[in-house]
Amino acid sequence: MSEHYQYHYSITVETNDEVVLHCLRAISQYAQQEGNRQIAWGGTNKKDWQQNDNRVTFHFSKPEYRIIFKNEASRLMRTLWRAISESDNDPATPQR
């Protein structure tokens, strides 16, 4: 089983600003404080974002990390993004 399965606390977000997308990716890496921090933002590149109507999904290994992500993203960019949905059972998918 892939270690991606451990990253099953997800949040799907929407932003219409590509720069904000890249900031959210950085915040997700900051929020995922242990393990493979790149898994948190896997599948959130510009192409993924464009193909999904300006929405992407971040995955975390602990619910606390998802909370850190939401809090920091709200603190820094309150009106530039919005949460669409959250799940506690949505494992990350390997990107390669």
Image (spheres, grey):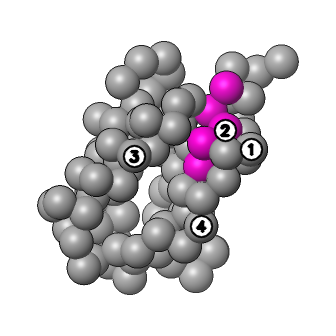
Q: Which mark is residue 85?
A: 4
Which of the marked residues, 3 or 1, is nearer the chain's N terminus? 3
* Residue 92 appearing in the image: no
Which of the marked residues, 4 or 3, is nearer the chain's N terminus? 3
- Residue type, numbered disc 2: His
Whole-percent x, y for residue 40 in the image: 50, 39
Are there few (<14), some (14-19), or many (20+) residues within 10 Å of tag 3?
Answer: some
Look at the numbered disc 4 and give the secondary structure of its residue.
strand
* Highlighted magenta segment, given as a residue range: 6-10
- Residue type, numbered disc 1: Asn
Q: CA distance from mark 3 to mark 2?
A: 14 Å
Q: Are marks 2 and 1 in contact (CB under 8 Å)?
A: yes
Judge by depth and name the residue closer to the eye, 42 or 68.
68
Residue position for label 1: 89
Give the quarter of the image for residue 26: top left
Q: Are marks 4 and 1 in contact (CB under 8 Å)?
A: no
Q: CA distance from mark 3 to mark 1?
A: 16 Å
Residue position for label 2: 8
Q: CA distance from mark 4 to mark 1?
A: 12 Å
- At horizontal 53% and vertical 50% (from top left) the residue drawn is 58
Residue position for label 3: 67
Of the 4 image quadrants, the one containing the C terminus is: top right
- At horizontal 47% and vertical 69% (from top left) the residue drawn is 83
Whole-percent x, y for residue 17 in the image: 32, 78
Are there few (<14), some (14-19), or many (20+) residues within 10 Å of tag 1?
Answer: few
- Residue type, numbered disc 4: Ser
Look at the numbered disc 3 and give the secondary structure of its residue.
helix
- Residue type, numbered disc 3: Ile
* Residue 74 appearing in the image: yes
